[in-house]
Amino acid sequence: MKAILTDTTLCIGCRDCVVACRKANALEPEVPRRWETRDGLSARNWTSIVERPGPVYVRKQCRHCLEPACASACPVGALRRTPEGAVVYDGSKCMGCRYCMMACPYGIPRYDWDLAVPYVRKCILCYDRLKEGKQPACTEICPTEATIFGDREALLQEARRRIRENPGRYADKIWGETEVGGTSVFYISDADLSFLTRGRELAQTPMPAHTASAMHAVPFAFFGMAATMAGISWIIGRRMDLQQKSPEDKKDDDHE
């Protein structure tokens, strides 16, 4: 399984990764929206550099959870996790419900409001490049190797080595190692990165464990509601028919 390790102490905020991502995924020019969050991400910008006090530069992108809540919440299977570790999106299946946006603990998926049929967009870990044996464009171009690509276990060992050998340089934590079951994009840093989870402390339990029971109920709720609405429609239609009939017709109906 592949992964990305980002070391914020090495990031210089050059944003080469942002440009490379846009080019590799042929993303259209950004259209600023006043309701977009101020983290730099959008349907047309899948990675961004967030500047924190220090300054500390933190690259933000989809975390590619090992057990993704977005895929669990999607009622049509438009999102899925691949064996390589990338969580990818199939727009041909998406119905635009945006459940994935509500489910994601990192607030990553974004809605493309400029399309006639809007879709959700996010980083797919350059999945086409992965299938060709290449690495994501963002890690390939990083001039300081602040963000590197490789096997997940090997990168976790590298992260632990850096923390162990430089205790004064890093916080004793690997963000994304175990939260919500673990991710394929994780961080080491000398700063608090809790802002990546909107300031919330995430549990170790994978999010689908909480959403699965609710999602299993969706088909039954859908068909149950459809049956209820059909029944209500029939009753209303019947009453309207009776109101339009003459008294003689109504008597005939009563005799029937």
Image (cartoon, rainbow, N blue to C red):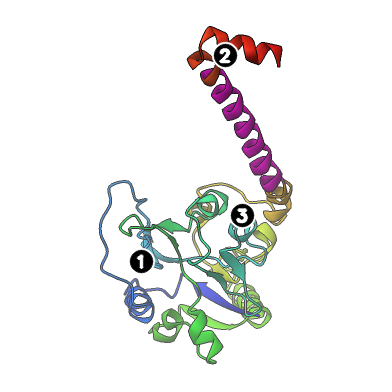
**What kind of residue is marked 3?**
Pro
Image coordinates for residue 208, horizontal then vertical, percent: 69, 55
Lower sequence index among marks 2 and 1: 1
Q: Is residue 248 above or below residue 16?
A: above
Question: Residue 12's quadrant in the figure?
Answer: bottom left
- The Cα atoms of the two marked residues, 2 and 1, are separated by 66 Å
Task: Give the residue at mark 2.
Answer: 249
Q: Which residues are magenta?
A: 217-240
Q: Residue at x 60, y 59 (%)?
A: 76
Which label number is shown at residue 75?
Answer: 3
Q: Residue at x 47, y 54 (%)?
A: 96
The local crowd at label 1, few if under 14, some if 14 to 19, many if 20 or more residues have their Cα within 10 Å, is many
Q: Main secondary structure of the magenta part?
A: helix
The local crowd at label 2, few if under 14, some if 14 to 19, many if 20 or more residues have their Cα within 10 Å, is few
Q: Is residue 231 above or below residue 103?
A: above
Image coordinates for residue 41, horizontal then vertical, percent: 38, 60
Image coordinates for residue 181, horizontal then vertical, percent: 69, 61
Which label number is shown at residue 134?
Answer: none
The local crowd at label 3, few if under 14, some if 14 to 19, many if 20 or more residues have their Cα within 10 Å, is some
